[in-house]
Image (cartoon, rainbow, N blue to C red):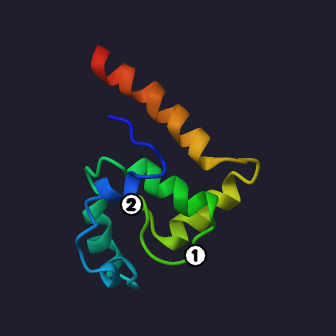
Amino acid sequence: MRYDYSDWRVHAYCRDSDPDGLFVRGAEQNRAKLVCMGCPVRTECLAEALDNRIDFGVWGGMTERERRALLRRRPEVVSWRDLLESAKQDYEPAQRVS
């Protein structure tokens, strides 16, 4: 299922949880990332964080350190939203075939 980027937050698994739980350090980040597993808008959330260079918290299943590393590895990406949406569309049909 695809969500409009303007309303993806209403479908997020973390929408009703304590927001402070996603802005933690160290081993607590692994627990925070578990909230993202299986979330229907994980891709949209990650794109939001990458496109807006959000420095803190767990977004789309990635910590700030993981996002910084990804941004350094792929400086040529202009729109993470477009890139991730394209990858998601390519992945979904492959899942239905197998």
- Residue 71 locus on image (x, y percent): 65, 59
Seen at 44% across and 48% down, the residue is: 43
In the picture shown, does residue 42 fall above or below 83? below
Q: Given the current orientation, which residue lies at the most extreme front position?
A: 6
Looking at the rendered structure, the kind of residue marked 2 is: Gly
Seen at 43% across and 65% down, the residue is: 59
Q: Secondary structure at mark 2?
A: loop
> Is 12 placed left or right of 74 in the picture?
left
Q: Quadrant of residue 91?
A: top left
Q: CA distance from mark 1 to mark 2?
A: 14 Å
* Circle 1/circle 2 CB separation < 8 Å: no
Lower position in the chain sequence, tag 1 or tag 2? 1
Give the label on residue 7, or none.
none
- Residue 48 locus on image (x, y percent): 53, 58
Residue at mark 1 = 55
Seen at 48% across and 48% down, the residue is: 5
Badge 2: few (under 14), some or many (20 or more) residues near its Cα, within 10 Å? many
- Residue 10 locus on image (x, y percent): 32, 57
In the picture shown, does residue 3 fall above or below 90? below
Residue at mark 2 = 61
Name the quadrant of the N terminus: top left
In the picture shown, does residue 37 fall above or below 64? above
Q: Is residue 98 visible?
A: no
Q: Secondary structure at mark 1?
A: loop
Q: Is residue 63 visible?
A: yes
Seen at 26% across and 64% down, the residue is: 34
Nearer-the-camera pick, 45 or 10:
10
Name the quadrant of the C terminus: top left
Badge 1: few (under 14), some or many (20 or more) residues near its Cα, within 10 Å? some
Looking at the rendered structure, the kind of residue marked 1 is: Asp
